[in-house]
Amino acid sequence: MRRRPRIFLPGPRLRAVTTALVLGGGLLAAPGRADTPEARFEAARAAYDRGDLATAVAEYEALLAEGVDPMPVYFNLGNTLYRMGRTGEAMWAWHRARVRAPRDPEILANLDLAERITGAPPFPQPFPASLFRQVSEAAWRRGLVSAWWVGLLALAAIHLRPALGAGLRPVVVLALLTAVGGLAGLGSWRILREQDPVVVVAETPAQARFAPLDTATPSMVLPPGTWARTVDRRDGWIEVERDDQRGWIRKEHARQVLPETDIAPALGMASGS
């Protein structure tokens, strides 16, 4: 995937495809056919360029539903939603892209500027969780598996050829340390996953209330793009917590960031508070 120059709002540009998109861990071949994910990804970009934003959004959502590599698709989906004036939904899509690429400068730049526009505070990540979440959950998992096999093979070699012990013991130690780091990284992401964070997607600040009723007393206001921890769900409402404050907002005003099983049709999301 070739990157375009760093993206700054407003008017973000989209990423282009120069290699096969990933589906189910494998590469999709036969580029150039009209029905390949690569061709459809480029068709969605073309629709964006000519201003047919609804078509672009629909195509990106279809690619996500089929399991195509979410990071570039969510990134471009966010850019398209932003151009449609749906900043809260765009920030949700960029946060989903960020889960796959936590240090990507283009994603971070878009989110930073969008947060300045909406007034949404960034999701607080205390140290050392913030350090471990600089690496994606998938990367930690790959590192842990690799360390396991490297360490196992080194121990097997030492067992079969004791003379190799002096040279391979540092490899075993390094594999052990890498595995411990991988477990810590996965644990950090697991804690975040258990918090079930959501992003407010209403295009005006969402009014949270002390009870899941439209007539309940307001408790706090959540700008579009605000992260919050899920506390409870009830009858079309979500109780969220932010900065030690809690309140209930309507389900359609927030979207999950984790787990990545919630492929939301952005065209069907409600707007407004």
Image (spheres, rainbow, N blue to C red):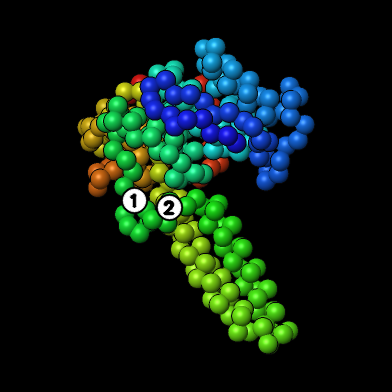
In the rendered structure, which amino acid carries the disc numbered 2?
Arg
Location of residue 231 in the rendering, given as x and y in whole percent from the top left corner: 36, 46
In the rendered structure, which amino acid carries the disc numbered 1?
Gln
Give the distance between the C-alpha atoms of the residues marked 1 and 2, in whole angstroms: 9 Å
Identity of the residue drawn at 71% across and 41% down: 27
Per the rendering, the mark at residue 133 is 2
Circle 1 Cα neighbour tier, 10 Å, few/some/many (<14 / 14–19 / ≥20): few
Location of residue 59 in the rendering, given as x and y in whole percent from the top left corner: 61, 23
Q: Looking at the image, is mark 1 or mark 2 earlier in the sequence? A: 1
Identity of the residue drawn at 46% across and 59% down: 185
Residue 270 in view (yes/no): no
Q: Which quadrant holds residue 20?
A: top right
Q: Which SS class for mark 1?
A: loop
Identity of the residue drawn at 29% across and 34% down: 120
- Which one is in front, 235 or 238? 238
Left or right: residue 234 compared with residue 58? left
Per the rendering, the mark at residue 51 is none
- Where 161 falls versus 202 (above or below)? below
Left or right: residue 223 compared with residue 2? left
Image marks 1 and 2: residues in contact by CB distance under 8 Å: yes
Location of residue 210 in the rendering, given as x and y in whole percent from the top left corner: 26, 37
- Which one is in front, 267 or 110? 110
Q: Quadrant of the N terminus?
A: top right
Q: Which SS class for mark 2?
A: loop
Per the rendering, the mark at residue 125 is 1
